[in-house]
Each structure stands twice: as structure tokens, then as C-alpha cells.
Amino acid sequence: MNTLNAPPLETPLWLASRSPRRRALLESAGVPLRVCPAGIDDADLAVAPVPPRQWVMALAYLKARWVADALRARTPPAAGTVLGADTVCVHDGRVLGQPRDAAHAGAMLRVLRGTTHETITGVCLLDSTCDARWTLVDAAQVAIGAIGDAEIDAYVASDAWRGKAGGYNLQDRLDAGWPIRCDGDPATVMGLPMRRLSSWLERWRGSAA
């Protein structure tokens, strides 16, 4: 497999995720895209015994690979650049991905409150035609203050934790008034490291014009 020094620019862009946050981040940056979620459910995967950055990078690639294969299987085959991404939280050396269920979500949030954790997002951009790929990993430190059990229980009951690493979305919880501080790119915590992707996004808009 070819690894690129610069991200591929083949159009269109296929987002290998059903995350509305990732889609909104790209659309707000003026990037036209098509959504084709990968058939991989993070919540069903057991974390491999590898460093967290390696784990998110592997999952980002697997998601991009799944969609690239699906595009090539179409008649006629569909071309373009596939963007795969994965986000996890790391607390005391333990990787926290998406909660399996409501009980798991509540347990995650109780572990994270009153502490600082690291949120890591891996990105893979894959040319669906030639398999050339470009990858990056970015991290941010997130401190969550004191949150009462009743507030956590009410949040979990809302089902807003579904599909979110660590069981929460940064902007959503900030808007709700939760005591959260982010050191790093907030977009990385929400699913895509937009600061690190900014130069590629500028090139992409030019190539897609």
C-alpha cells in the first residue's frame, strides 16, 4: 500500500462515518462531501493491546478501507477520497471508546468527572482508486469538573451519549453548562482535528471548485 506525504485530493470526498458532528465540521469548513458510513461498530470492538494512538489510527484506516472496498464494488465503481476517523478517550491509561449501553455510559462519565483525560482522534484519507493513504493523529486534554449523579442519570436517560467516545460530546455538554475545560483543538474532541486538517481543507476546496 502506498503512503502519501500529502493527503489525496481526488473528488468527491466520501465520509466513512454516520457522525453528524464530523459531517457538520466538514460542511462548516466549506467541504462538499458524500456520506457512506463504514459497516464497523466501534462499541462492539475490544481494544487491542497497543498504544491508544496506534489503535485509533488502525480503526480510522479500517473504516476508510471498508468504504473504499464498497465503492469499488459498485457498478460502475465509484472513485474519490475516503475519510475515515476514530476518536477515543484515554483515562489513567485505559481506552474508553463508545459506550455499549446506558449503564456503560453512566459508568464512563462517573469515571471521567473530577479528572482530566486525553481525547485522541485518528484520521485516514484513502484514495479509493489506488489505495494511497495519508494519516494523522491529534490529541487534546479535557478536564471535567464535578457533576452530580442525578445530572449524569438524566443525561444518560436522554440517549445523547450514543455514538460518542467517552459518552459525551464536548460542545453539547458545554452548551448544557457542564464544567469542562479543553486544552487543544476542541474539534479533535468532537471527532475531527480541524486545525491539523486546515491546509488540506484549503487545497480540497480549490480542487473541488
Image (cartoon, grey):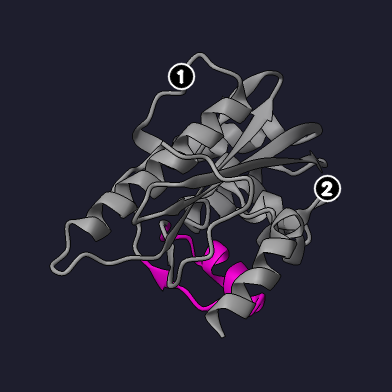
Whether 148 is drawn above or below 194: the answer is above
Q: Which residue is at 80% across, 34% downward?
A: 114
Labels in figure, total: 2
Question: What's the residue type where badge 2 is placed?
Answer: Gly
- Image coordinates for residue 3, horizontal then vertical, percent: 52, 40
Q: Which amino acid does label 1 sit on?
A: Ala
Residue 106, x across and y down, in percent: 55, 38
The residue singled out by tag 2 in the image is 184
> In this image, 78 relative to 85: left or right?
left
Q: Are marks 1 and 2 in contact (CB under 8 Å)?
A: no
**Of residues 118 and 178, which is closer to you in this image?**
118
Image quadrant where residue 167 sits:
top right
Relative to 40, 157 lies left or right:
right
Q: Residue at x 35, y 45 (%)?
A: 65
Residue pictured at 46% horizontal, 39% vertical = 2
Q: Position of residue 19 (x, y in %)?
A: 47, 60
- Whether residue 113 appears in this view of the structure is yes
> Which residue is found at the position 60% from the left and 20% from the top?
51
Numbered badge on residue 48? 1
Extent of the magenta region = 17-35
The secondary structure type at the circle numbered 2 is loop
Q: With respect to residue 120, does 73 lie above or below?
A: below
Q: What element carries label 1?
A: loop
Give the quarter of the image for residue 110: top right
Q: In this view, does 42 lie above or below 50?
A: below
